[in-house]
Amino acid sequence: MQPFTTHTGLVAPLDRVDVDTDQIIPKQFLKSIKRTGYDEGLFFDWRFLPDGTKNRDFVLNKPEYQGASILVSGRNFGSGSSREHAPWALQQYGFRVVIAPSFGDIFRNNSYQNGFLPVELPEPLVRQILDRAERERDYRLTIDLEHQTVSDSADTLANFEIDPGVKHRLLNGLDDIGLTLKLAGDIESFEQRRSDILPVTV
């Protein structure tokens, strides 16, 4: 998993509340057994019109937001079903961070497992960021996980909370498997001693 330390990127404002996982990646894109290619389905029903052409009014289709890597949205982002494909789709499209006033718990945990950072900020501040991203061309933020700050070119806007254990894992690029492998020596030592500790019973 790619470590997350500090990221600076263009902000795309998705000014909607209750963006659920079926809107992030619709169910018809969940048939693949691979973990790649989900960027094509990201926000599919909003990015495209019924005839298959791009919806020019949707934020991610606007030229000024091409290459955005920080998504800002409304409260309750990532609610709904538990599909891990939602953070996959966001990452594969090019996003590293999503900022919102609140998140679905399962989406938040799936994001952490994949090195994708959900940042929860107070709703008035999120509103301010949304407005600035809509009004100012090339509006960028820097997310510093080590110091837990969100800043723009003018100032530090906020500090954000994150569980220390999750922070350690993200900074070091450790998912559950990676975290377990760090204990490989202890596991091997236990396996060598296990027959003495736990006698075989018949």
Image (spheres, rainbow, N blue to C red):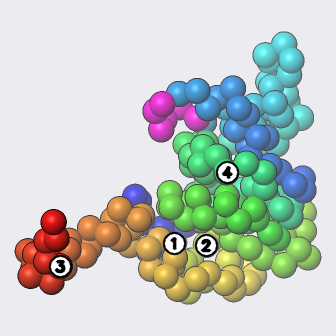
The residue that mark 4 highlights is: 82
Q: Residue furthest front?
A: 202
Give the CA separation, mark 2 to mark 4: 26 Å
Across and down, in percent, residue 181 comes to 26, 67
3 or 2: mark nearer the eye: 3
Q: Amino acid at mark 2?
A: Ile
Q: Which of the marked residues, 3 or 2, is nearer the chain's N terminus?
A: 2
Q: How many marks?
A: 4
| Residue at 83% over, 62% down | 76
Q: Amino acid at mark 1?
A: Thr
Q: Amino acid at mark 4?
A: Ser
Give the CA separation, mark 3 to mark 2: 49 Å
| Residue at 60% over, 43% down | 85
The residue that mark 2 highlights is: 143
Specify the principal SS of the magenta part: loop
Give the CA separation, mark 1 to mark 4: 27 Å
4 or 3: mark nearer the eye: 3
| Magenta region | 33-38
